[in-house]
Image (cartoon, rainbow, N blue to C red):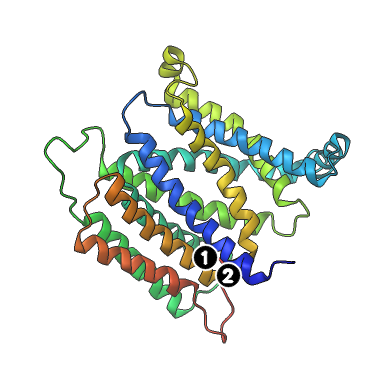
Amino acid sequence: MENSPEFYKYVSLVVLTVQNAAVGLSMRYARIRPGEMFLSSTAVVMSELVKLFTCLLIVFKEEDSSLGKVKIAIHEQIIRQPMDTLKVCIPSLIYVVQNNLLYLAASNLDAATYQVTYQLKILTAALFTVTILRRKLISTQWLSLVVLVTGVALVQLADQPTKPGEANANQSKVIGFSAAIAACFLSGFAGIYFEKILKGSNVSVWMRNIQLSFLSLPFGLVTCVINDYTQLKEKGFFYGYDGFVWYLVVLQATGGLIVAAVVKYADNILKGFATSLAIILSCIASVYIFDFHLTLQFAFGTSLVIGSVFLYGYVPRTHNRVKV
């Protein structure tokens, strides 16, 4: 019996929700748990490597499990299109920097605050849509952006009571917020860059990710050397790696690919619902896992962010949708 489109919509809702919530919670736990701390720059590299091999495997399956056909596909879509491939260098570098910034944000912000703050990527994507793509936003979308900024500000300014000796001297809310903001701007620009520069290309989504990962690897390795050369030399590339770190690497590598596979079944309302559920799940999980203290100001700010997500995605029928 063939599954209906409604079935796939519900599956995509679950996938998007779990992916959004799991990444933030897992990154935060990985950065504060006891034991040897892995180097986040190496985790970014390994995620790109896992993504590269995953996409190669998918292309291998699509090409009737023929290595010869895979070689031809790579030659036709990547090697014979050098200018198209070179264009991907910019987002490749951006994604490496962005992922390193997200680790920095997760190291300094609790999971709930991180999840809410990262929704500012809606604002940055909208701003780049207007300035680069020259599209217009309708009044409700502008209003949603104001509500979004207000909500994030309330969340950031909310006092989080801590028990004596609980605060980590190595954590800085200012650094975490700055890293999250920078990651949001990079995320917004990279998304719009793809839409403007690479629109109309005949390269498949899996081949595009092969391009991205292949070009991201050298950028990631350079980042490792710049940020962690001394520790790499003393402790090695895989210092602090265990089962949970490998799970996080795979989650980051495959999570985006899974989302790419199901996102065609999700409209703006469903995406907003998934984002909102992920924020709620992150807050609830943070209370039990990280002993997070939910204040009235934080809850109100989070409600504004959730409302802004729905408001931005809602476009009356008399208007054309602005995709971000």
Q: Position of residue 201 (x, y in %)?
A: 75, 55
Q: Quadrant of residue 297?
A: bottom left
CA gap, disc 2 and disc 1 = 6 Å
Residue at x-position 36% and y-position 60%: 280
Q: Residue type at mark 1?
A: Lys
* Observer-nearest of 136 and 103: 103
Q: Quadrant of residue 63?
A: top right
- Please state, as top left, top right, bottom left or bottom right, where the N terminus lies in the image: bottom right
Q: Position of residue 281 (x, y in %)?
A: 38, 57
Q: Position of residue 54 (x, y in %)?
A: 67, 39
Q: Which mark is residue 257?
A: none
**Element class at badge 1:** helix
Q: Position of residue 154 (x, y in %)?
A: 25, 61
Relative to 7, 164 lies left or right: left
Which residue ends up furthest to the bottom in the rendered image? 318
Q: Residue type at mark 2?
A: Asp
In the depicted structure, whether residue 289 falls above or below residue 216: below
**Element class at badge 2:** loop
Mark 1 surroundings: few (<14), some (14-19) or many (≥20) residues within 10 A? many
Residue at x-position 54% and y-position 70%: 268
In the depicted structure, whether residue 267 falls above or below residue 21: below
Residue at x-position 86% and y-position 38%: 66
Relative to 152, 53 lies left or right: right
Given contact means CB atoms under 8 Å apart, are the residues at marks 2 and 1 in contact? yes
Task: Identify residue for label 2.
Answer: 267
Task: Identify residue for label 1.
Answer: 271
* Observer-nearest of 75 and 242: 242
Residue at x-position 62% and y-position 71%: 6
Mark 2 surroundings: few (<14), some (14-19) or many (≥20) residues within 10 A? few
